[in-house]
C-alpha cells in the first residue's frame, strides 16, 4: 500500500486540515513554504491520466477550500496549485496529489519559463495534430 493510502487509512499520522468523503488534505511533511498542503483523493489513482471527472472536480473544490483556509489563517495572498504526474515531471509519490503552495515574497521557488518568439509554423502543425 502506498504512503498516501496509509495516511488515508490512518495507519500513519498526518496533519489533516480538511477532509470529506472524496479527499484528504494534509500538510506536506517537507514544507516548501509555510502552509504547503497536499490535496489527495481517497481512492488510489496514480496520476492525472487516471483521475475520473468526479475525483478531479472534488480535488479542485477542496483546493479552493484549502486556499481560502490558508488565506484566512495565514494571511496568504499568493498560491500556486501544482501537480507532478510522472517521474520525469517530478512525481515521487505515485498517488495523485495536488500541491497547494503558498507564495511569499522571500521564497526561492521559481517556476518562470524561458520566453521565446512564437513559432507559428510549429504551432499550426501541433494544433492540427491535436484536433485531428
Ligand atoms: P511529488 O514530488 O509531487 O510526488 O510530491 C510528493 C510530496 O509528498 C513531497 O512534497 C513530500 O514532501 C510529500 N510527502 C511524502 N511523504 C509524506 C508524508 N508522510 N506526509 C506528508 N507529506 C509527505
Ligand atoms: Zn495510494
Image (cartoon, grey):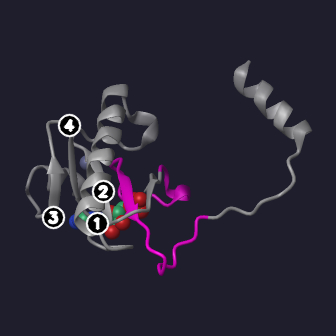
Provide the residue span drawn in magenta. 85-111
Picture quadrant where residue 131 is located: top right
Picture quadrant where residue 115 is located: bottom right
Which residue in the protein does label 3 denote? 15
Which residue in the protein does label 4 denote? 22
In contact (CB < 8 Å): disc 3 and disc 1: no
The residue tagged with tag 4: helix, strand or loop?
loop
In contact (CB < 8 Å): disc 1 and disc 2: yes
Q: Is mark 4 within 8 Å of ligand 2?
A: no
**Residue at x-position 71% and y-position 27%:** 130
Residue 92 visible within the image: no
Which residue in the protein does label 2 denote? 38
Residue 98 percent coordinates (x, y)? 37, 51
What is the spatial separation of the Cα atoms under label 4 and label 1, in whole angstroms?
Answer: 19 Å
In contact (CB < 8 Å): disc 2 and disc 4: no
Which residue in the protein does label 1 denote? 28
**Residue at x-position 47% and y-position 54%:** 84
Amino acid at each position: 500500500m502506498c504512503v498516501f493510502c496509509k495516511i488515508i487509512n490512518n495507519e500513519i499520522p498526518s496533519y489533516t486540515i480538511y477532509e470529506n468523503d472524496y479527499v484528504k488534505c494534509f500538510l506536506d511533511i517537507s514544507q516548501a513554504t509555510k502552509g504547503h498542503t497536499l490535496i489527495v483523493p481517497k481512492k488510489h489513482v496514480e496520476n492525472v491520466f487516471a483521475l475520473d471527472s468526479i475525483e478531479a472536480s472534488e480535488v479542485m473544490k477542496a483546493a479552493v477550500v484549502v486556499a481560502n483556509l490558508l488565506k484566512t489563517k495565514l494571511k496568504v495572498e499568493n498560491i500556486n496549485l501544482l501537480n507532478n504526474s510522472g517521474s520525469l515531471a517530478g512525481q515521487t509519490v505515485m498517488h495523485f496529489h495536488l500541491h497547494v503552495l503558498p507564495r511569499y515574497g522571500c521564497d526561492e521557488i521559481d517556476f518562470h519559463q524561458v520566453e521565446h518568439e512564437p513559432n507559428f509554423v510549429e504551432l499550426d502543425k501541433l494544433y492540427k495534430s491535436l484536433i485531428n
